[in-house]
Image (cartoon, rainbow, N blue to C red):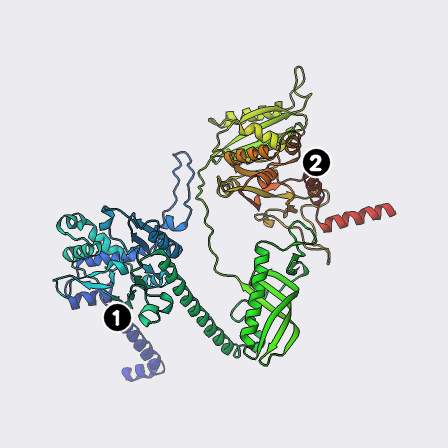
Amino acid sequence: MRLSSLLALLRPALPLILGLSLGCSLSLLRVSWIQGEGEDPCVEAVGERGGPQNPDSRARLDQSDEDFKPRIVPYYRDPNKPYKKVLRTRYIQTELGSRERLLVAVLTSRATLSTLAVAVNRTVAHHFPRLLYFTGQRGARAPAGMQDDTYVQAPRLAALAGHLSINQDLYLGRAEEFIGAGEQARYCHGGFGYLLSRSLLLRLRPHLDGCRGDILSARPDEWLGRCLIDSLGVGCVSQHQGQQYRSFELAKNRDPEKEGSSAFLSAFAVHPVSEGTLMYRLHKRFSALELERAYSEIEQLQAQIRNLTVLTPEGEAGLSWPVGLPAPFIPHSRFEVLGWDYFTEQHTFSCADGAPKCPLQGASRADVGDALETALEQLNRRYQPRLRFQKQRLLNGYRRFDPARGMEYTLDLLLECVTQRGHRRALARRVSLLRPLSRVEILPMPYVTEATRVQLVLPLLVAEAAAAPAFLEAFAANVLEPREHALLTLLLVYGPREGGRGAPDPFLGVKAAAAELERRYPGTRLAWLAVRAEAPSQVRLMDVVSKKHPVDTLFFLTTVWTRPGPEVLNRCRMNAISGWQAFFPVHFQEFNPALSPQRSPPGAPGAGPDPPSPPGADPSRGAPIAGRFDRQASAEGCFYNADYLAARARLAGELAGQEEEEALEGLEVMDVFLRFSGLHLFRAVEPGLVQKFSLRDCSPRLSEELYHRCRLSNLEGLGGRAQLAMALFEQEQANST
């Protein structure tokens, strides 16, 4: 009775209990299948099938895994030790310990160093990150990758290396048999080049000394192959991981232009190359083959894009021209509209100096000529043999640079059309062309570091003495406190009747503030120089400072309103390159606070965009800064003393007497570099240089251009268009009432 009554009570819940029990059992069973009993079932399976696992192979496996992980060094600052600035490397791969994928070594000789070695360098050096040359008798036994009489198709070799594992022993090339040895004993022929993995070289390194004494061979490739076989038991292979090393032996007096065999067209290396001109002819032929292959792939991709465009929501209307390139830039306001530059075959109507018309010359003329030739070539390719076109003249030409696509051209051409029967007729047609942007490449520049000491130079007039203590306090907080590698020289400029005997010193407060900083920061010395000048000019003042410092000094010419910090000093070090480039940053100038308050309402419609704010202005911490980058000012500059002395000597050589005196009074330092130096002059906005509003003193002794720039800087620095319009409106309202 009791059992039956208990079953009657549990019968409604019986399906739930059975379902929970079955679900828990299946879950536990599935977990046991997935996890197993070992830590790594794949590794254990390999060990069980092949016997006990080799500890060396296990260690090699762990080492290979570590090669793919970056070595991150955590930053820790010991509070008990003095602060030391951390110098960063130029490239992030240096800090991470990354290695280049391919290093190419070339075996050459003194006799062919100026011919074949130069040809190799010109044909393959720009494709490989590292290229080393070995020459001499000891270098003949170095494990070189190729000889100087070998032409290598660099893009194909780089692609082959990218498909191979870097942690496996590899000796890949054109396998040749040793004389009198077995079939397994093969070496890679040095004339066709070979690939050696880093792991194999590391294993071979302890045996190199023994191979030098035990193996005698006149050929370095045979010596290297014998050393690998005797020491490590590794022979040359022509195929590895499905990748085959293809080479071609060029017959004597064979013309590369007439060679069309499949072995030649698909070869990675061609040997022998008897002279440098033959190397260049081979490079021309293979470059043409690669170009044809690239054009063929582009056409195939464009056909695929056309086929897929039909399936998109926009359909064929969404297909941009040319196919496969980004669509033209679409402006969102009238301030973003890209303008077109008008030109003819002789003149351009968009000149750098603002002139309405100037001759078309130099690179611009070559660019226009190339566009005309390409347009005529494409027209003839499309309509021949029915029609043939000849250019008579260019009616109108327009071009603009689209940052998303490249240089766009619109040409109105007057053409002479000739039919197959010889009939001629003049036609006017409009064509559109695009020179697309290619791969971005890093320009070769001399190496610079952030460890160079910066010598700041601050010229101070009597009228600027009151603002000098604020500059010194900012210098202490931004430079002295973080222990930046920088010094400061104050150039105190006295007038003819100022600071004389019995007269008060106008720079007494500046000298006291400098002495206070020297007391607060032991070991710091703020130098100052006193100069008396009736009409001080920037060039004359710089002449005084230049004579007091070595030629390798990096100067940072600054103003009393500038607040340089660590980031600004680092950009000064990186952008000023001795013998190569001078850097003149564009500072951010705040507007007049009386006309442009810190937090102003959004501009009215049609009043133009709001004034730009420098990067780093955080509205959450306060009102955004209203101002602009002052392109008219050039008071700040970074340059080396040797470069300044060279430009100054050239100025003295080209100008003499009264003409030189007038030039020294009317020029600034940037103009001296621009007119009398062959250095690159780099101008860029510097968001770290934010200056308070101030009106510059425009000396009438300046040249007409510099005086105009000074006046324009003061006028543009008053406020934005919206603020100036509001001020004029309020003034008119006040006058009317």
Q: Residues within 10 Å of mark 2 (few under 14, many from 20)?
A: some
Q: Is residue 628 above or below residue 303?
A: above
Q: Could you tell me which secondary element the residue under label 2 belongs to? A: loop
Residue type beneath disc 2: Cys
User: Visible in this render: residue 448?
Assistant: yes
- Camera-nearest residue between 287 and 569: 287
- Residue 85 position, x and y percent, is 43, 38
User: Visible in this render: residue 319?
Assistant: no
User: Which residue carries the number 1 mark?
Assistant: 32
- Residue 34 position, x and y percent, is 28, 70
Q: Nearer the viewer, mark 2 or mark 1?
A: 2
Outermost residue toward the right in this view: 737
Residue 698, disc: 2
In this rendering, would 395 be left or right of 194?
right
- Camera-nearest residue between 123 and 526: 123
- Residue 71 position, x and y percent, is 34, 51
Q: Is residue 509 above or below residue 98?
A: above
Q: Could you tell me which secondary element the residue under label 1 belongs to? A: helix
In primary-sequence order, the first of circles 2 and 1 is: 1
Q: Is residue 126 above or below residue 661?
A: below
- Residue 214 position, x and y percent, is 13, 50
Q: CA distance from mark 2 to mark 1?
A: 86 Å
